[in-house]
Image (tube, rainbow, N blue to C red):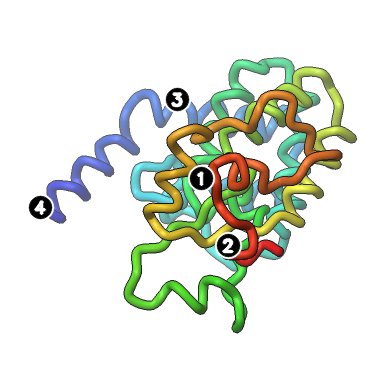
Amino acid sequence: MATQITERLNRKRMSDSVQQFKTSFEMFLTETGADAELIRHLKKDLSAKMDMPYYKEVKGRRNLSPREVCIGFCELAISYEDKDFIKTALAWLCKQQGQSFRKISPQDKKKGSRYQSIARGKKIIWEHPIPVNYSKNYLYDCICKNDLKKATDYLSFLSRVHQVCLLKEENDLILKQYKDTMPNGWDYQNDSPYIRYTLSGMDLKTLGLI
C-alpha cells in the first residue's frame, strides 16, 4: 500500500499540470527579479509534500520568517502581470501546514498552553482562527489592487494570531458554519479574530484564548 501511494504521488508530481506550474513559477521568479534567499524559501514551501513540484530539490535551513516570505511573495506578485498565475501560485503555497502562508500564524506549544493540557492521548487539530482560504482570497485582492501596504498590514496581523488547539469535536463544530469564511462584515482591525468560536457557542476561556 505504501509503495502504491508513493508511486501515485510521484506520478502526480511529474504530471503535465504540475510540471507546467513549475515552469511558470520559474518564469515568475526570473521576470520579477526575486532575491535568491526568497526564491529558496518559496521553493522550499513548494517541496513540502511528495506530489509538490520541488520535492527533495531544496536544502538548507530557513533564514526568513514566514511573515518575511509572505510579504516577499506579495511584493513580487504585485509587480507580475499574469494575475491568474498568481492566484494559482497562492493556492499552491497554502496547501500544507509547513508552508509560510500557514505557519505565519504560529502554534503555541509552550508549557501551560492548552496544547500541553489536552494533547496527550487525544486527537487534536491546529485550527487557524482566520481560515487560510479567507486569508488567501484577501491577499489576492490586495495583490490585484497593487496594495502592498494593505497586504503587509494584514500579514502582520496574522503573525500575531496563534493557531488554536482544538479537539476533533470542537473543530467539527466550527466547520459546520465557518469552514473557509469569516462572518459577514468581519473586519480584522476592529473585530475579534476568535469570533468564529464565540458564534459557534464555544467558550474562549476554555480554549485558552482569554
Location of residue 65 by image quarter: bottom right
Residue sitting at x 62%, y 51%: 100
**97 and 162: which is toward the camera:** 162
**92 and 34: which is toward the camera:** 92
Total marks placed:
4
- Foreground mark, 4 or 3, reads 4
- Foreground mark, 3 or 1, reads 1
Residue 207: numbered disc: 2
Q: Are marks 3 and 2 in contact (CB under 8 Å)?
A: no
Spatial separation of the CA atoms under disc 3 and disc 1: 14 Å
Q: Which secondary structure, mark 3?
A: helix
Q: Earlier in the sequence, mark 2 or mark 1?
A: 1
Q: Which secondary structure, mark 2?
A: loop
Spatial separation of the CA atoms under disc 3 and disc 2: 43 Å
Q: Tell me if residue 75 can be seen.
A: no
Residue sitting at x 52%, y 72%: 115
Residue sitting at x 49%, y 35%: 179
Q: Earlier in the sequence, mark 3 or mark 1?
A: 3
Where 91 sits versus 50, above or below? above
Q: Are marks 2 and 1 in contact (CB under 8 Å)?
A: no
Where 89 sits versus 37, above or below? above
Residue 20: numbered disc: 3
Q: Name the residue under label 1.
A: 46
Which residue of the protein is positioned furthest toward the right in this rendering?
A: 149
Spatial separation of the CA atoms under disc 2 and disc 4: 38 Å
Q: What residue type is labelled 4?
A: Met
Which residue of the protein is positioned furthest toward the bottom in this rendering?
A: 111
